Amino acid sequence: MPIFGIYAFLAAIVFNLKFFQGDLWNRLSNVNFFLLSCVVAGIFWGYAAWIARQYYKMRSEYGERLHLSYFGYAVTPVLLFHMGAVWCLASVTSDTVGIMKDYMTDYFPTLLFLVVGYATLLLFRPEYALGSSLLKIGNTDERVLEAPVPVNLDAHIDLYSLFSYLLVSGGMGPKFSGTAIRFFDIVFIESYSKEQYVILSDGERMFGGDIFDQLKQRGLDPWMLKISKNYYINTMLIFYPIKPRSRKLKLQPEVYENMLTKVSQDKIDKLREIGPGMKNTIVEDFLANKNRMVHKGWDDFIPLR
């Protein structure tokens, strides 16, 4: 994440170079220029987060073939918001139109280049999406596996960024310890009256034994949300935020793609549907209680016996 701050600050410097007169060195050494660049860097950080969110949203729906509306949803709101904010600031002066014309000439082309360029970059280098911590998606190389394991998730990580943090910390699996599977790799539990099965992050289906008893002993059972008659989903692996009262949940793109190695798209789509007879607010109810959830145990190995 810190490298994103560096990128945003450098982009802000390029963007703000025309705010002061004089030669290049005098502008770069000006304290006001530095402070202004910090503010603009924070704004650009917000824009990058919005674009990354739209990228993951579209990717979860369309996979690798992103819908053309991705650019519309990702870029247009940023440009409209930015120019609207500039207009509001310019409107308190006596030369609003003149300031807007100068801004459109001097700064808007750079803003357009940065915003469209970043949105385009994610199509080819999704690891640069803000929120993935520059993780190479789908590639659990040694640098990812050696990332430090979090100690106190509750103090730092919100549910909406929990998956990215856990993925960086532990990498994509599934990972086994003998016959035990890491909880983070259990996507679904398929439950019947006398037996249970787990469906893992690579799509493999395995006998689950007393999986619910094992999760309850560790306090992990609240994370498994019942969404249909026979299926539970690991809410750590849901793509957030979700549409209110949605009947089909989205999986994190990395999980969805990993499952496709062994399960068809139609099967995955069926698994993530909220079944008939289930209340419309089950996920909303879960989110309402998320602050009481303990964000630990994701790397516990659950015996399947």
Image: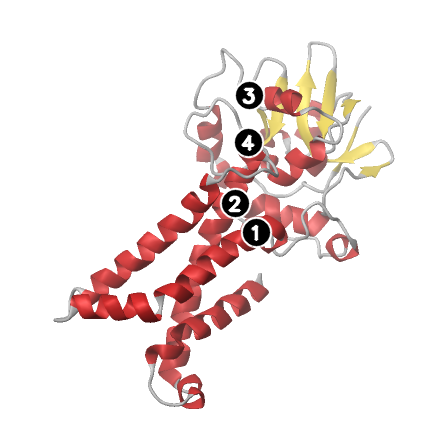
Q: Secondary structure at mark 2?
A: helix
Question: Above or below — where is 111 with respect to 237?
Answer: below
Q: Which mark is residue 55?
A: 2
Q: Tell which circle, 1 or 2, labels the residue nearer the N-terminal end.
A: 2
- Going by the numbered disc 1, the residue's amino acid type is Leu
Furthest-left residue in view? 94
- Disc assigned to residue 122: 1
Dot placed on the residue nearer the N-terminal end, 1 or 4: 1
Callout 2 environment at 10 Å: few (<14), some (14 to 19), or many (20+)? many
Q: Position of residue 164 (x, y in %)?
A: 60, 47
Q: Mark 1 against mark 3, which lies toward the viewer? A: 1
Q: Quadrant of the N terminus?
A: bottom right
Mark pair 2, 4: CA separation? 14 Å
Mark closest to the chain's N terminus, 2 or 4: 2
Report the side of 131 relative to 167 (left or right): left
- Identify residue for label 3: 273
Could you classify mark 1 by the number of other residues whose Cα lies within 10 Å: few (under 14), some (14-19), or many (20 or more)? some
Amino acid type for the residue under numbered disc 3: Glu
Q: First in sequence: mark 1 or mark 3?
A: 1
Q: Secondary structure at mark 4?
A: loop
Point out residue 32 in the picture as x, y percentages from the top left corner: 36, 81
The Cα–Cα distance between marks 1 and 2, rounded to whole angstroms, is: 7 Å
- Taking depth in this image into account, of 134 and 265 the one nearest to the observer is 265
Q: CA distance from mark 1 to mark 3?
A: 28 Å
Q: Amino acid at mark 2?
A: Tyr
Give the secondary structure at mark 3. loop
Quickly name the residue at label 4: 250
**Front one among 193 and 144:** 144
**Residue 227 picture location, percent across and down:** 55, 20
